[in-house]
């Protein structure tokens, strides 16, 4: 019971002070206004919180296992890109794609205060080979007119090339067709007919072998950067498109499971937080 109450108390104190790292434990305990509850009630509350916490831990582990499953499936189907033991046809990014950068918001301008028709996709939105929906920013019409040439289309491949998330690739979902692209990422535009499935290419770039290539070539002085010419010279494998599509279908099915688990996880986390608030403030 005390462990949960301490967690709730810590949250309250952090709202009022600069933190608890310099607060001695006995002083901290004296400041806690411990609720007077019977032992039976304390046990009931702890069991309830333990149950929800157990569910959260299990779902987080399930998500990790799904990620590991997709990575293992990729290696099983295509091998290690560094050694190309399956002897796929090889080339470079520049042979098949144009690499086009995004654009920063003009100096003196900023994000819109409310949702508009113009999403602005940042590097922090680019995770899990897709675009996360939880914190999308928007720009108004005036800003859009200044940077309207720097947009993405549905199914484009993005690659972050500046900052701590450098090197992450993914596919632009349909709902972000026409969105503006940050200066911290590029898009890969096919030059000719489609020879690569976007989902395959994303996982190919995110694979350990290509991440090793990226890390060896990024500029590490100051903010990490990967020059466009480095991206253009990135090695590329071209397995049969049918095989790539099979992998993409597998990822799609896994993503459905991931989405269901993620929604349950968020609901359980909200329940846990509300119970902590109810019992411990």
Image (cartoon, grey):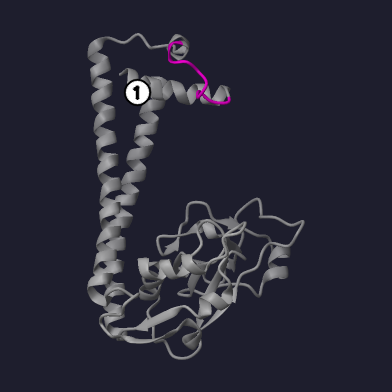
The one nearer the camera, 187 or 91, is 91
Magenta segment: 18-26
Residue at the spot 24% in from the left edge and 32% down from the top edge = 51
Q: Is residue 7 magenta?
A: no
Where's residue 273, x and y in %? Answer: 39, 32
Query: Helix, strand, or loop for circle 1?
Result: helix
Question: Which secondary structure is most common in the magenta stretch?
Answer: loop
Where's residue 247, x and y in %? Answer: 28, 74
Where's residue 65, x and y in %? Answer: 25, 54
Q: Is residue 89 above or below residue 63?
A: below
Do we see residue 281 in this rendering?
no
The one nearer the camera, 138 or 229, is 229
Assign the C terminus to one quadrant of the image: top left
* Disc 1: which residue: 4
From the viewer's perspective, tell me whether residue 220 is left or right of residue 113. left
Q: Residues within 10 Å of mark 1 (few under 14, many from 20)?
A: some
Where's residue 70, x and y in %? Answer: 28, 64
């Amino acid at each position: 019971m005390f462990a949960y109450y301490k967690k709730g108390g810590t949250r309250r104190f952090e709202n009022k002070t600069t933190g608890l790292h310099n607060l001695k434990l006995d002083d901290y305990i004296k400041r806690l206004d411990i609720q007077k509850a019977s032992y039976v009630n304390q046990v009931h509350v702890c069991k309830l919180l333990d149950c929800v916490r157990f569910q959260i831990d299990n779902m987080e582990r399930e998500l990790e296992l799904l990620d590991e499953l997709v990575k293992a499936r990729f290696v099983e189907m295509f091998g290690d890109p560094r050694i190309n033991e399956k002897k796929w046809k090889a080339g470079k990014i520049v042979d098949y794609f144009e690499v086009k950068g995004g654009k920063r918001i003009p100096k003196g301008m900023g994000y819109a205060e409310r949702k508009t028709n113009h999403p602005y996709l940042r590097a922090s939105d680019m995770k899990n080979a897709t675009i996360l929906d939880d914190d999308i920013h928007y720009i108004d019409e005036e800003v859009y007119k200044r940077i309207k040439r720097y947009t993405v289309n549905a199914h484009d491949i993005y690659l972050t090339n500046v900052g701590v998330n450098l090197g992450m690739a993914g596919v632009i979902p349909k709902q972000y067709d026409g969105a503006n692209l940050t200066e911290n990422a590029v898009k890969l535009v096919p030059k000719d007919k489609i020879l690569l499935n976007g989902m395959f290419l994303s996982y190919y770039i995110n694979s350990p072998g290509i991440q090793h290539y990226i890390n060896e070539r990024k500029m590490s002085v100051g903010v990490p950067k990967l020059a466009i010419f480095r991206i253009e010279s990135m090695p590329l494998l071209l397995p049969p498109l049918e095989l790539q599509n099979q992998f993409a279908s597998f990822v799609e099915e896994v993503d459905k499971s991931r989405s269901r688990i993620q929604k349950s996880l968020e609901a359980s986390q909200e329940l846990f937080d509300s119970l902590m608030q109810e019992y411990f403030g």
